[in-house]
Image: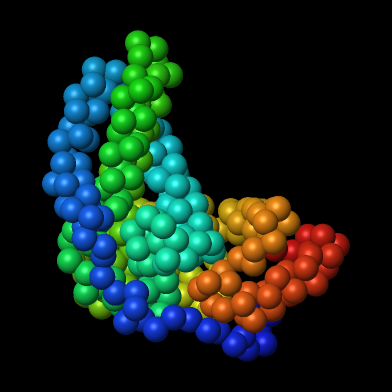
Amino acid sequence: MGRDTRPLRIQQREVSTLAGTAKPFRILETVCTYSFPLWWLTLLARTWSGFRGPAFVVLATIVGILLSDFITGMFHWGFDTWFSPTTPFIGRAFVRTFREHHIDPQAICRHDFVETNGSNMFSGIILILTGHACMGSSAGAAFLATSYLSAAVFMSMTSQIHKWAHADHVPRVVTWLQWTRLILPPQSHALHHVAPFDRSYCISSGWLNATLRYVRFFQILERIISALTGVLPRHDDIGVEAAAALVEVEERSAPERQGNGAT
């Protein structure tokens, strides 16, 4: 069953209240932006001797791309759907920018390099540390570490890729990467910016969006979390009235989907 086309009364915050990064987090973003290449090189140096040929590297790279796409989708969904810009620590550091982006999608194009990429560099460093923890003498350990090496690169570039998906002009090589779908293409990401912003969360390559939508991965998670907490998904982003209307549509359409197998 397709999206209910009845208009929703979307209520969002004033975009002016969402601009700007908290100073302590800006410092962390700056440190991560400049130190990420060094962290990445340390893992590359450790995995280099474990490469088992071109097929090994290509497969590990693909696994890394899929992993980064899934992780970005989880974070994007999480910060779009739950929490608030006033939530301690993560509110101003992470949630704020997602709320701002739904109200003013072009704001990301005005962010400088650090504000655009710093938080993803931080996540990339965590993946690098996980890759170091996976290192071992076996082929399996080398494959895991190499996959994390690949995932860290795409994770660190996620917001830049996202920014390119909104930019009016990008370098030709970026246009080619978007056309080949090696990175998120604008036409694919545009699906996310149709209110109420409830689909196409993966913003690294976007490869997993169709599959996760087909199996209703995020919708199932939302129903579980709401059942356990009583909190409406997206209520802080689009307003309680619109959030409640979406839940009603989802519950009403579920029996029909189960009967005809539609997504």
Position of 6 with respect to 82 (left or right) is right
Q: Is residue 48 above or below residue 5?
A: above
Q: Quadrant of the N terminus?
A: bottom right
Position of 207 with respect to 174 (left or right) is right
Q: How is the image coloured?
A: rainbow
Where residue 51 appears, as percent x and y from the top left, is: 29, 22
Q: Is residue 254 above or below residue 154?
A: below
Inspect this view and state whether residue 85 appears. Answer: yes
Where residue 208 appears, as percent x and y from the top left, is: 51, 52
What residue sits 45% from the left and 47% below the top?
Answer: 71
Q: Is residue 112 above or below residue 217?
A: below
In this view, the residue in front, 6 or 215, is 6
Where residue 167 appears, as percent x and y from the top left, is: 27, 74
Where residue 162 appears, as percent x and y from the top left, is: 33, 63
Quadrant of residue 151 in the image?
Answer: top left
Quadrant of residue 76 in the image?
Answer: bottom left
Q: Is residue 57 above or below residue 119?
A: above
In this view, the residue in front, 22 or 245, is 22
What residue sits 35% from the left and 14% below the top?
Answer: 136
What residue sits 40% from the left and 19% below the top?
Answer: 141
What residue sits 34% from the left and 19% below the top?
Answer: 135
How many numbered marks, from 0 up? 0
Inspect this view and state whether residue 56 appears. Answer: no
In this view, the residue in front, 27 or 183, is 27
